[in-house]
Amino acid sequence: MKKSTAPPFSEHFPTGLQNWPQDTRRFDHFLKAYPDILGGQKGNSAHLSPCLLSSPHSGRDYLSSFLSTAQLPLYALQHMEDRFVDDLVAELPGYGMSLLHARFPRSYCDPNRNWRELDPNMFRPSLDPDFVAEALTWSERVAAGFGVVPRCVQVGRPIYRHCLEPDDAFHRLNHYWHPYHQALQALQQEITEIFGLSVLLDMHSMPPSPQYADADIILGDAFGQSCAPELADKVEAFFQQAGYRVRRNRPYSGGYITRAYGQPDQGRHALQIEISRKLYLNPTTLAPSSRYSALKETLTTLLAQIGQWTLSSAANEALRPAVCAAGLQVQPQTRQKAYS
C-alpha cells in the first residue's frame, strides 16, 4: 500500500514555531502573495500602535472542491466560523493596529492549531508510520475531531463522507496554514522591531452556552503565561467599564496562536479575546443582528483605547521589564526606517 510522506516544510521546522528560522520577508509580501488566502493591513503609520490583531477563524471563502467532499451543508460548516469577527475589527488599522485574518474557513484548515495536531485516522492511504510517530501530536482536540484539519463541526458530527487523501492534508498545511503563520510571524517581528515589544490580540467569537452564560467576553492568557498580567488586567478593565461581563481563561484559556506567540519574557505578549455571538449574531440565520453595528462601534472604540494604552509610559514599564530581565537589548527602530 502506498504510504504518504511528511509535508515538505516539516523537515525545516522540526520542533515548533519558536524554532523556525526567521523569514526575512515582510508582512506586506505575504498579503500580496496570498490575496485569496490572507486579508488585513498594517496599522496607520501616523498612529501606529504596538498592537496587532489576528482573526484566524473568520474566513468565509469555501472552495467548491471542499464543499463537494463534505457531507454537511454549507450552513452547518458556517457554524464553525467566528462569523464576521474580521469585520468587527476592520476599522482598527485606521487607529494604528495592524490586522491579519484568514479568508479560508476553519472547517477546511485551522490556523489556531499546531500543524502537528493532524489526525492520522482521517487519511487513506495511511500516513507513514514513522512520520506519525515522530512528527504528529495526539491531543484531546484531535481525538474530538478538532485538529488542524477538522474532522467534525461538533462532537460526533463528521464533516466528510469518506477518508481524505494525504496529499489533501499536506496541501492545506503548505498553502493555507503555513502562509498564515508566515504572515503573522512577520507582522509580530516588524512590530517588535519598531517598539521593542508587541501585543497580539487574537480575536474569536463563542457560541451561547450554559457553561459560560454569565460572560460576554472571555479573556485567555494561558493562565498568566502568554502576557504580562498588567495587559490582561487593563483589557478586562476596559471591557468592564463598557458594561461587559468578563471572565478569564475558563473555558477558553487561549489556543495555539496565543501560546505560541505569547513570549512575555521577550516582550511579545498575546491575549485571546472571545466575544459572545449573542451580542451581534442571529443564531438562526447567522446574519448580523440588530445589535451588530453598535457592537462594532463599541469594540472599535475599546480596542483603540487599548492600543493607545500600549503606547503609554505605564504600558512601557509593564510590558518591557521582562525583555530587560532576559538580558535582551531590544531597541525600537524609527517608524520611517521600519516601514521603508
Image (cartoon, rainbow, N blue to C red):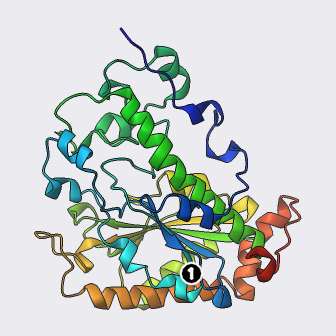
In the picture, residue 320 is in which quadrant?
bottom right
Residue depicted at 30% across the width and 28% down the height: 122
Residue that extends furthest to the left in the rendered view of this protein: 284
| Image location of residue 109, percent across then percent down | 38, 47
Q: Amino acid at mark 1?
A: Lys
How many circles with numbers are drawn on the protein? 1
Is 338 placed left or right of 221 in the picture? right
Residue that extends furthest to the top in the rendered view of this protein: 1
Q: Circle 1: is it few (<14), some (14-19), or many (20+) Cα within 10 Å? A: some
Is 83 placed left or right of 27 in the picture? left
Q: Nearer the viewer, residue 192 or 170?
A: 170
Residue depicted at 63% across the width and 87% down the height: 309
Is 180 placed left or right of 156 in the picture? right
Say above or below: 149 vs 207: above
Residue depicted at 31% across the width and 60% down the height: 61
| Image location of residue 9, percent across then percent down | 59, 36
Residue, disc 1: 234
Quarter of the image with the C terminus is: bottom right
Say above or below: 215 vs 149: below
Residue depicted at 47% across the width and 46% down the height: 175
Which element type, helix, strand or loop, lies under badge 1?
A: helix
Can residue 61 be spotted in the picture? yes
Quarter of the image with the N terminus is: top left
| Image location of residue 287, percent across then percent down | 18, 75
Say above or below: 25 vs 174: below
Can residue 223 be spotted in the picture? no
Say above or below: 334 vs 174: below
| Image location of residue 163, percent across then percent down | 25, 28
